[in-house]
Image (cartoon, rainbow, N blue to C red):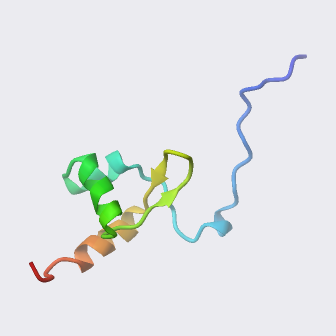
Amino acid sequence: MPHDRRSPLPAQPESTTPRRYNRSAAQIADEFGVHPRTVRRWLAEGRITGRRVGPRVIRFDAEEVAGQLIGGVGGAA
């Protein structure tokens, strides 16, 4: 029987990652009613944090992003 090259990679255990970084910029943008470019700008400005999981892939923890954005409301204009 030939080897199936499409077999999935082994999953990393949940315990190694304290938060669930499983949302894309597009998903975060949809949740907050903004454009994905805005999410990437917030990341570049340091308003939110994300985790790079590939050379061009960044994932976000929705709860963490919500806390960072709500915590930033009411600052100096």
Q: Tell me if residue 28 comes above or below residue 62 in the rendering.
A: above
Residue 56 location (% of width, % of height)? 49, 45
Kindly indicate the quadrant of the structure image that contains residue 75: bottom left
In this view, the residue farthest toward the top is: 1
Which residue is nearer to you in this view: 36 or 6?
36
The residue at the point 32 percent across, 74 percent down is: 67
Quarter of the image with the C terminus is bottom left
Q: Position of residue 5 (x, y in %)?
A: 77, 25
Toward the viewer: 73 or 13? 73
Q: Is residue 1 above or below residue 14?
A: above
Q: Residue at x 69, y 50 (%)?
A: 11
Above or below — where is 76 with respect to 28? below
Q: Which residue is located at x 26 percent, y 71 percent?
A: 69
Image side of residue 65 versus residue 32, left or right? right
- Name the side, left or right, on which 39 lies relative to 1: left
Pick the residue in front: 76 or 2. Answer: 76
The quadrant of the picture occupied by the N terminus is top right
Residue 70 screen position, x and y as percent: 24, 75
The answer to whether any part of residue 30 appears in the image is no
Farthest residue, direction right: 1
- Taking the spot 46% from the left edge, 54% from the top edge, the residue there is 59
**Is residue 58 in sight in this rendering?**
yes
Q: Position of residue 35 (x, y in %)?
A: 22, 47
Q: Residue furthest left?
A: 77
Q: Residue 15's quadrant in the figure?
A: bottom right
**Relative to 57, 14 lies left or right:** right
Q: What is the number of callouts on the image?
A: 0
